[in-house]
Amino acid sequence: MPTLAILDYGMGNLHSMAKALERVAPDTRILITQSAAELRAADRIVFPGQGAIGHCRVELAQRDLLGLLPELAREKPTLGVCLGLQAALEFSEENGGTPGLGLFSGRVQRFPAGIPEGPGLLPIRIPHMGWNRVDPTRPHPLFEGIPPGTRFYFVHSYYAPAGTAEVAAVSHYGVPFAAAMGRGSFFAVQFHPEKSQHAGLRLLANFSRWDGSTPAPVS
């Protein structure tokens, strides 16, 4: 039986993620773990997260995972969720400026206050919380069976820019931003698939079967 490990570093909706994965992948062992050995042995990894990136980095460092996580994400199918996407970039403006893991290019920024969501609309509220449409920018196995414009559930105050080569899907909240990014065997989403009903479950089911192969980003 294949094993899917959910990384437990003290942040993230671990049990709701585990329940969602158990539902869509009944023939897979779902494991919540902090163990480097169990992460190395797993067939797939989920890197969840919510909260601040500075705290995330501290927790990863305390578990000796700062170097291991990027290594494993390049070797086996790995899914980042919410903060798991932001932490994968080179740098974040959050917490006064925090280095990321460098799996994706770009800098994480805070949503600008006071800008309207669209013509004649009220200024956006921060954090961005609720359902928003997601439009893939290129084919990816994790979006199989999910139509463009499908809505997913978001909760975040910071975002990754939409203009880098690794961006796999975009959304819009005052400004366009990366809703999903992918490079090699690592894929990450800004939204919460475990809270996104049928579409989120479909994405997780796709991940549970994904072998890590994907079209290379356009350079």
Image (tube, helix red, strand yellow):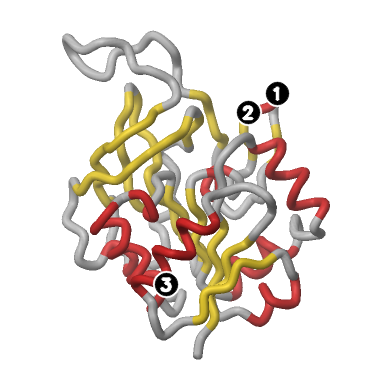
What kind of residue is marked 3?
Answer: Glu
Q: Pinpoint residue 41: horizontal percent, then vertical percent.
A: 66, 82
Would residue 5 be found to the left or right of residue 150 on screen? Answer: right
Q: Which residue is mark 2?
A: 94
Could you tell me if the residues under marks 2 and 1 are in contact, i.e. CB atoms within 8 Å?
A: yes
Q: CA distance from mark 2 to mark 3?
A: 33 Å
Question: In front here: 142 or 31?
Answer: 31
Foreground: disc 3 or disc 1: 3
Which residue is rendered at x = 47% and y = 54% of the image?
188
Taking the spot 26% from the left edge, 10% from the top edge, the residue there is 122
Query: Which badge, 3 or 1, is on the more N-terminal residue?
Result: 3
Q: What separation in Å lies between label 2 and label 1 (alpha carbons)?
A: 5 Å
Using a 10 Å C-alpha cutoff, classify the residue at mark 2 as few (fewer than 14 neighbours), some (14 to 19) or many (20 or more): some
The C terminus - image quarter: bottom left
Which of the 4 image quadrants contains residue 163?
Answer: top left
Q: Secondary structure at mark 1?
A: helix
Q: CA distance from mark 3 to mark 1?
A: 38 Å
Q: Earlier in the sequence, mark 2 or mark 3?
A: 3
Q: Which residue is mark 1?
A: 96
